[in-house]
Every structure is written in C-alpha cells, then in structure tokens.
Image (cartoon, helix red, strand yellow):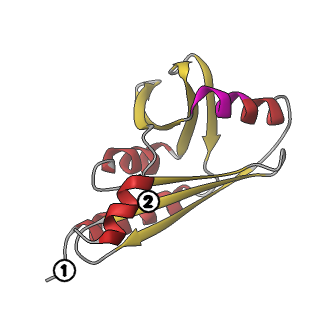
Amino acid sequence: MSDELKEFLKKVHPGITTFDFDGKQTPCIELDEKKYDEMISKVAGQSLSINTDLNILQDGLGNVFVEITLTFSKGNIVEKFLVNANTDLEFFESLAKTSMLALSSPKSNYGKDNVFMIQLPRPEKAQDALDIIKDALIPKN
C-alpha cells in the first residue's frame, strides 16, 4: 500500500451512512454534535443555498475517494468530507437516486428530528459522479 493511499485512508470521514427516509435510502454525513450544533445555529431560520461539489480522486488501481465540499451561502460555512467510495458505494448510489443529502449529529433521530436535509439542484450531476466512481473502482490492466 502506498504512503499516499495510507494518508487518504487516515483522512476518511468516519460518519458516512444511509438511512430510510420515506421508504428511500438517503445518504447521510454524521458530524460530531458540537460541529453540527454550531453549523445549524449559523443558518437556522434563513433561506440559503448549499453548493455541493464532488471531487473524485482515483489512482487507476481501483482505489476511489470522493471529497465532498459543502459551501453554504450564509454563515460563512465550508465543510469538506473525504469518503472512501470502495467501502461506501451505497452512499453514492443513494445520492444519485434521491438527490438528497442529510447532515446529522450522533443524537439525531434519522428521518424525524435533528437532521438537516440538502436537496441537490442538479440530480444528473450525482448520477454522473456515480458512473465515474463505478468506472474508477474497476482497476485498469
């Protein structure tokens, strides 16, 4: 395993999951409680947009990581999360299907309370990203 791959693995965000929301698996990034509370307090009750960028990083050997960057239009918030697509492919499959992304804290009751939902404005971009990820997961010989 290369040193670069080891470094990526160390930086992977641990709180990547999905949960059932109205009968659909919905991708979710779990934040520590303090960070979640700070973020929500900055944007609560405001009309805002959230730019969601997926930067796909691959090594040609089947290792794929995705850096998710969320840039909030209010509150001066920019959050980055590194996701290992090899182990969390279901996260990206559900993102492509639902065009929704949830942010939560460990105390959240998924689908009921303490969950901040983000609607992706361009669903086709999530599907394009999934196609690139799946293609990159297959090592090229």
Q: Vertically, is 16 above or below 44?
A: below
Q: Is residue 79 left or right of residue 136?
A: right
Nearest to the observer: residue 1 or residue 92: 1
Q: Is residue 53 visible?
A: yes
Determine if the magenta segment contains residue 16. Answer: no
Magenta span covers which residues? Answer: 32-37
Q: Which residue sits at x=40%, y=51%?
A: 92
Q: Which residue sits at x=33%, y=45%?
A: 90
Residue 103: x percent and y percent?
Answer: 58, 35
Label 2 is placed on what type of residue? Gln
Q: Which residue sits at x=42%, y=46%?
A: 97
Nearest to the observer: residue 8 or residue 24: 8
Residue 141: x percent and y percent?
Answer: 13, 83
Query: Label 1: which residue?
Result: 140
Quadrant for the N terminus in the image: bottom left
Q: Main secondary structure of the magenta part?
A: helix
Query: Sequence order check: which comes first, mark 1 or mark 2?
Result: 2
Query: Label 2: which residue?
Result: 127
Circle 1: element type? loop
Question: Which residue occupies the extreme left position in the image?
Answer: 141
Q: Which residue sits at x=42%, y=70%?
A: 57
- The image quarter containing residue 33 is top right
Q: Vertically, is 129 above or below 22?
A: below
